[in-house]
Image (cartoon, rainbow, N blue to C red):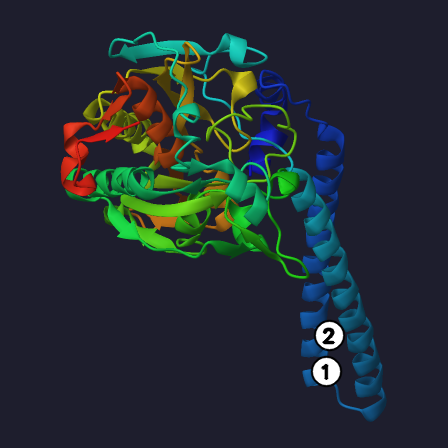
Amino acid sequence: MLDINLIINDTESIVQKLKSRGYTLDVKPILELYNQRKKTIKLKEDIAAEKNKVTDEFKTSKTDSEREKITKKSQDLEKKINNNKLLLERIEVDLNNILLQIPNLPYDSVPCGSDESANVITKTWGNPIESSIEHSEMFVKNKLLDFESAVTISKSRFIVMKNQIAKLHRSLITYMMNMHTEKYDYTEYYVPYIVNNESMTGTGQLPKFKEDLFKIHDSDLYLIPTAEVPLTNLYRNKILNENDLPQKLVAHTPCFRSEAGSYGKDTKGIIRQHQFEKVELVHIVHPKNAETALEEITLQAESILEGLDIPYQRVSLSTGDLGFAASITNDIEAWFPSQNKYREVSSCSCFTDFQSRRLNIKYKDETKKKNYVFTLNGSGLAAGRTMAALIENHTKDQVIHIPEVLHNFTGFKTIKL
């Protein structure tokens, strides 16, 4: 959520920044509600002052008739106070509903453009190979990847993995988690896979992306689209000491996405599923350290691909391609030889104080002043997509050669097709 004072005091700049990401901000209703709130608060203070005055008059009154008049006046003021309170609550709700719909402001350094065509490649690693091997086709016969059974059990865009492929998938997750906890000093968490409305709203999934979520019938509960939601919400309504920052959290969870609006896209293989596994990295940091933290998360996610010897590129997303809550994003894209292109396996983003304002996460500085923290997250990595890239980049003569870093986890070095 944006700071309303920024919108009020720097309107033109905010409008232009939001316009650069394809969002047209209508300031008029915000100004009207903001001014109405100011007047209502002033009225509340005036009535409260009058009420205090009446209370003092009652203490000095000498006759029953005087006390009766003062009591009646006090009761009338109390009704006004209650009505004023209800009005202020309605104004706050209306104003909040508008602010919740406004995306975050992009950093000045973000490439300006209307869509992904304006994204900028900022780094490449490895040597992309040529191959026509598609990751899912080679497993259909032996049902190591079983799409038909998944449809029978559930519906399309789910997968059943078996035997060595299931173990390879699990080994990848273990490798990622060990790297982040042992080498990069993240604190590991096990978190709920079902969260409430407030949690989704706090990290920006609601109200904007309701159609992309799986909601549990007759409840305010949702299946998580990413571990970012429960991890960041661990700090909701908390005030940290400045010397407690940064906080670095990691969790492995399944992720559930309805993929609304993506019908017909990536229907082959395991690129776009309703359920998939992901290792998520979250940082809670001092604002001055946010850019350093973003580079840190990005490098750590990239190191997983380097350890697996999978070529990749880093892409700086343009203003028009940024996620709703992000101010700046680095996508990491792994090479898929069968498609002759790079595909995203991680998004690393800084959200500035956009989420912390929604979640009320603050820190106290050395003067005891309370300030909003900055939040960041990144995938480290999406396990299914990473496994697909691994298979395509390490298959030769109908044999998948497992990268050395996984041998202790898999217990095998190759998978023969």
Question: Which residue in the protein does label 2 denote?
Answer: 54
- How packed mark 1 is, by other alpha carbons closer than 10 Å (few <14, some 14-19, many 20 or more), is some
The answer to whether one can see residue 364 in this image is: yes
**Residue 223: numbered disc:** none
On screen, residue 228 versus residue 45, left or right, reads left
Question: Which residue in the protein does label 1 denote?
Answer: 58
Which residue appears at 30% of the width and 25% of the height? 390
Task: Kindly give the residue lying farthest to the bottom in the view shown.
Answer: 64
- Report if the CB atoms under discs 2 and 1 are less than 8 Å apart: yes
Relative depth, front residue between 258 and 361: 258
Q: Position of residue 313 (x, y in %)?
A: 34, 14
Which residue appears at 59% of the width and 12% of the height? 114
Which residue appears at 45% of the width and 16% of the height? 110
The three-letter amino acid code for the residue at tag 1 is Phe
Q: How many discs appear?
A: 2
Relative depth, front residue between 48 and 224: 224
Which residue appears at 60% of the width and 42% of the height? 155
Relative to 146, is 126 above or below?
A: above
Q: Position of residue 74 (x, y in %)?
A: 77, 76
Judged from the image, the secondary structure of the residue bearing numbered disc 2 is helix
The three-letter amino acid code for the residue at tag 2 is Val
On screen, residue 263 versus residue 389, left or right, reads right
